[in-house]
Amino acid sequence: MTQHQLLLRLQDLDGQMARLDEQRRRNGLSAYQERLERISEELNAKMQRLGVLEAALSDDGLPALEQEIRALQASIAKSSSYDTALLKSQLTPLEQKKAELEDLTLRNMLEFEELQPQLPGLRESLAEVQQELEEARPEEQERLDNLAMRLEAMARERAELTGLLPTDVWQAYVKTGRVEEIKQGRCRCRLEVPDHFQRQIRAGNAWVCNTCGSLLVQTLKP
Ligand SMILES: [Zn+2]
């Protein structure tokens, strides 16, 4: 392998390794994990709301209010005509309050009855996604192992290649990270490379383009 072939292969390897490394950093299970989180959140919110509704329904304040109304009605029945008007004026807001409480209790009951049957379905979805996640785990591990293996092989090849390069060429490559071929006496950025530099490059010297900063190699005769 000539020096320019080495450099091109090195650049190719570095590109591939960067892509594989990016794939390795990607979490192949995130779709499952996001779904799990969404369902859990929904389930928790509904369970919490059901708890609130249950507490409100078990103690809606109606019995106490009804008792108060009955007592007041009894007083009205026994009262003198002078007191009756006053007592009746006290009764009106209590009856209003009772109607409001009954409305609220009815609404709470309807909401409770709507929410409660949703829980089994949500729990089922949660279990399903959890199972899918567990089933996907080995495949994801296999994918990661495979990537690690390929990266390791590439790293070995890279080390071999860099060991074959003269230090100054290697350092120029590390600095620029980019290799360009001279075509028709020009760099890819169109800069014309003088003949004596082209000879030096063919002889294996490091030469970095002033304009675009690429490390230049020559594969074809100019
Ligand atoms: Zn250039």
Image (spheres, helix red, strand yellow):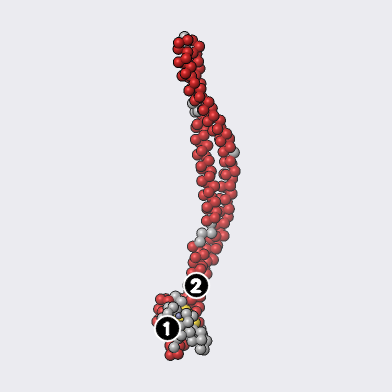
Instruction: Residue 13 in the image: state x and y as whole percent.
Output: 50, 74
**215 is higher (above) or lower (below) than 196:** above
Residue 115: name its quadrant: top right
Whether residues under marks 1 and 2 lie with C-beta atoms below 8 angstroms apart, the answer is no
- Mark 2 Cα shell of 10 Å, populated few (<14), some (14-19), many (≥20): few
Residue depicted at 49% across the width and 25% down the height? 97
- Mark 1 Cα shell of 10 Å, populated few (<14), some (14-19), many (≥20): many
Q: Nearer the viewer, mark 1 or mark 2?
A: 1
Instruction: Residue 68 in the image: state x and y as whole percent.
Output: 48, 19
Q: Which mark is residue 207?
A: 1
Instruction: Residue 195 in the image: state x and y as whole percent.
Output: 45, 90
- Depth order, front residue of 145/38: 38
**87 is higher (above) or lower (below) than 222:** above
**102 is higher (above) or lower (below) than 222:** above
Q: CA distance from mark 1 to mark 2?
A: 21 Å
- Amino acid type indicated by mark 1: Trp
Q: Quadrant of ligand 1?
A: bottom left
Residue depicted at 59% across the width and 43% down the height? 121
Residue depicted at 54% across the width and 33% down the height? 108
The residue tagged 2 is 15
Q: Which mark is residue 134?
A: none
- Depth order, front residue of 110/24: 110
**Number of labelled discs?**
2
Residue 170 seen anywhere in this rendered image of the structure: no
Residue 28 seen anywhere in this rendered image of the structure: yes
Q: Secondary structure at mark 2?
A: helix
Comes first in the chain, label 1 or label 2: 2
